[in-house]
Amino acid sequence: MKYLDEYRDEKIARGIVAALERRATRPWVLMEICGGQTHTLMRYGIDEMLPAGIELVHGPGCPVCVTSLETIDKAIEIASRPEVTLISYGDMLRVPGSHSDLFHVKAQGGDVRVVYSPTEALKFARAHPERQVVFFAVGFETTAPANAMAVWQAKREGLWNFSMLASHVLVPPAIRALMSSSRNRVQGFIGPGHVCTVMGYREYEELIRQFRVPIVVGGFEPLDLLEAILMLVTQLEEGRAEVENQYVRSVTYEGNLLAQKVLAEVFEVCDRKWRGIGGIPESGLAIREEYAEFDADRIFGTEGITAEEPAECISAEVLQGLKKPTDCAAFGKRCSPENPLGAPMVSSEGACAAYYQYRRHLVTVGGSR
Amino acid sequence: MPPATKLDFALQCSVPLAAKESVLLGHGSGGRMSGDLLRNIVLPALQNPVLERLDDQAIVEIGGSRIAFTTDSFVVKPLFFPGGDIGTLAVNGTVNDLAMGGAEPLFLSLALILEEGLPLETLRRVMESIRVAAAVANVAVVTGDTKVVEKGSGDGLFVNTSGIGVVAAGVRLSADQARPGDRVLLSGTIGDHGITILSQREGLEFESAVASDSAALHTLVADMLRTGGEIRCLRDPTRGGLSSSLNEIAARSRVGIELEESAIPVREEVQGACEMMGLDPLYVANEGKLVAIVEPCAAEKVADAMRRHPLGSNARIVGSITQAHPGMVTMRTRLGTSRIVDLLSGDQLPRIC
C-alpha cells in the first residue's frame, strides 16, 4: 500500500541497522515519547533488530495511560447521570477509575458512545437537543486542536447542550520533568511526530539548551523509528545535542499555525496531574474562562473530585523509562489486559500492553529477555 | 520506594477494578472475555462431550448418520450494509458453521425477534435476502418462530438461525487435530466485513469502497475435501477475526502457529481504514472466508483447489503449525522479526491519535 509499504521495507531496515552497528561505539539509552511509537517498536519487533547496546525505554506519551485517575472518576460521575450522553474516544472506555470504568457505566445503563472525532459529538448534540452531550477530551497536543475547534464551534452556534471534559497534556513539560529527575537515564529522545505536526519543534530547542539532550522528531512507521534512532546515535557519538526532524513528510519547524491559533483561543496552560507520575507544573491545557459555559467540569460541579493512586504497580517507573514492563513481577501474571493493575496495560499504546500483546513470547520469567 | 522529592516523581499507580460482575460488550467480542464467559458460566451448566469439543458445530450420530448441528444469533448494526444485510448473514453464517465441520448443509430454522415499531418494509427486505441466500446456498428454511418485544427492548431486528447437515463418512475436522508441520491456508482477503460494518456505524462513518464478504462456503469446502488431501480443521474467522480462530486452534491442538505477515492478503481499502483507526486486520471480522489446517504434502493441492473456486481465488498458504510456543500464535513480520498474534481481551477500540 502506497505511503506505508515504503516505510516497512525489510532490506532498507537492515541497511539502517547495519549503519547503526557501524556508528554506535558504546551503549546509549534512548526514549521514544509516543505510545504510538512504542506500539510500532513492539509490533514490528524493532527491539530485536537493534545492536545490543542501544536500549529503548518507553516514554509517557500514551494519552490513555497518563490521564489522571480523578479525570476518569469525573467522566464516570458525569456519564452516570441520566440526562447525559458521554462521548469518548474508544480506548478510554476500558481505563479503570477508582471504582469502575466507562464500559461498566454503559452496562449499567449510562449513555456512553464512541466516536472518532469530536465533530461527531457536535453532530450528536445538534440532533439531540434534549440530551446533555459531554465530550471526553483527552490526549496530547495532537488531539487538542480538533477538540478546541469543537468548543469554538459550539459557542458560535449556541449549542448549549454541548460541553467538554478536557484533560489535555503537553509533551515538553513532561520531557523537562523526566530530565530533571535525579534518576533519569535517558540520553536522547525520539520526539513525538504527531504532536510536532501540530506544534512544530521550536519549543524543543529550549529543552536542548537547558539539558543538552538530543531530540529527533520521529514518525511512526518502522523505518521512521529506525532512522530516528540512527540520527540520535549519530548526534550522541559526535557529541552534538540538537533538535532534528526525521518526520519531514509531516512536521515543519513552525507546525500548524492555524491549529495552534484555535488551541490558544479555547485552551490555556494549567498544572496537570499525570497518572502514574504525579503533578507536573504547566503541563496541561484547560478550557479558558471565556468558554466556561462549555466546560463540563464546571457545569457538572465535578471540580472537587480527587483520587489518590496507591503504589500498586511499577507503571510510574515504566512511564519514566526507569524500568521495562517485563521487570514487573506482576507482568502477564497478576497484570494482564483483562485485569490491568495499571493504565499502561490498558491501551494498545501503553508500554505494558504492547509488550504483552506482541513480545510476550520472547520474555523469560522474572525479567527481560 | 524512595520518598518523592520536588524534582522526582511521586511513584503512584492505579488500583485494579473490583470483580466485574455484569455483562459487558467485550463479552460478545469473540476474544478472551467471550471465552471466559463460556468457560466460567455457560459450560459448567451443560457438561457433555459433544459440547466440550467447542467446534463451530456439534457432530452427533443419529441412526447411523453423522449429523452436523449448529446455531447462531445475528445482532448487526446497521441492518443493511454494502454486500449484504442481517438476512444474508443469518443464512450464510449458519451454513458456514456447518460447512466448517465438513457437512453438507441441508435445513435451517429461522427465529425473528422484532422490536415494536420496526417498519414492515424492513422485514420484507430482510426476508427477501434470506430467500435469495438460502436459494444460492441450496438449503431450505423448514421451521421458524417470531417474537415481538416492546420498543426499546430490542434493536429493530435480531435473527437466530439453526442448521443441520450431513457429514460424509471419513470426514473428521476439529480444532484439536492440528499437528506440527501442517500448513495454514487462508481463502482470501481478511477484514472486509468488519471494516464495512465499521464504516457504516453511527459516529464512525467514513467513505469506503469495501463491501462485506458474506458468502456461503460449503461448495468451496466440498471442492477442498474432494482433493483427498488430509484437512485437519476448518474455521470461518468471523468475530474476533483470523487471530481468534487461530488462537483457538493453537490452544485446542496444543501447538504453535507461525504466520507470515507478507502472505496474508488484505485489501488496500481495509488496510487503509485499519491504519487510520489503529486497528489490526487480523482481529477484524470476516463472513465469507475460511482458514484451513492441512497436512504439509497436501497443502499445495488443496490451495490450488481453493483458487479454482470463485470464493477462494485469493487463497494462500499463510503459515504453518510448529512445535514451539504451544497455544500461541506468532507472526514473522515484514521486517523479519517475530511478534505474537494474541487473543484480544474484548473488542478492538479505535485509538485516540
Image (cartoon, coloured by chain):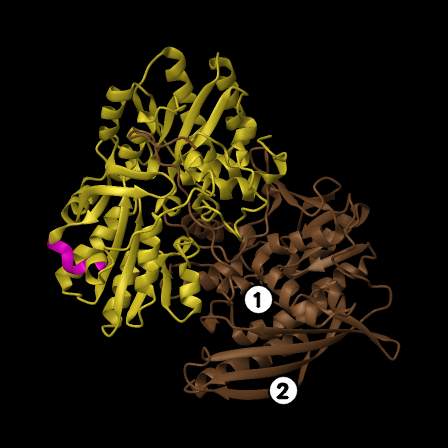
Residue range corresponding to the magenta coloring? A290-296
Q: Quadrant of the C terminus of chain A?
A: top right
| Residue A177, x across and y down, in percent | 30, 31
Quadrant assignment, res B35:
bottom right
Which mark is on residue B144? 2
Given residues B15 and B253, the one toward you in this image is B15
Q: Which chain is brown?
A: B
Given residues A255 and A144, the one toward you in this image is A144
**Nearer to us: label 2 or label 1:** 2
Tell me what residue is drawn at x 63 percent, y 42 percent: B330
Quadrant assignment, res A106:
bottom left
| Residue A20, x across and y down, in percent | 48, 19
Magenta span has B58?
no
As measured in the structure, the alpha-carbon distance from the residue carrying label 2 to the one carrying label 1 is 22 Å
Left of B53 or right of it: where is A102?
Answer: left
Q: Which chain is yellow?
A: A
Which mark is on residue B155? none
Magenta span main SS? helix
| Furthest residue in direction front, as rendered | B3
Residue B339 lies, with reference to residue B112, above or below; the image says: above
Left of B115 or right of it: where is A138?
Answer: left
Badge 2 marks a residue whose secondary structure is: strand
Which mark is on residue B214? 1
Tell me what residue is drawn at x 60 percent, y 76 percent: B133
Give, as a three-letter code, the residue at label 1: Ser
Q: Chain of mark 2?
A: B
Magenta span has A292?
yes
Q: Chain of mark 1?
A: B
Q: Earlier in the sequence, mark 2 or mark 1?
A: 2
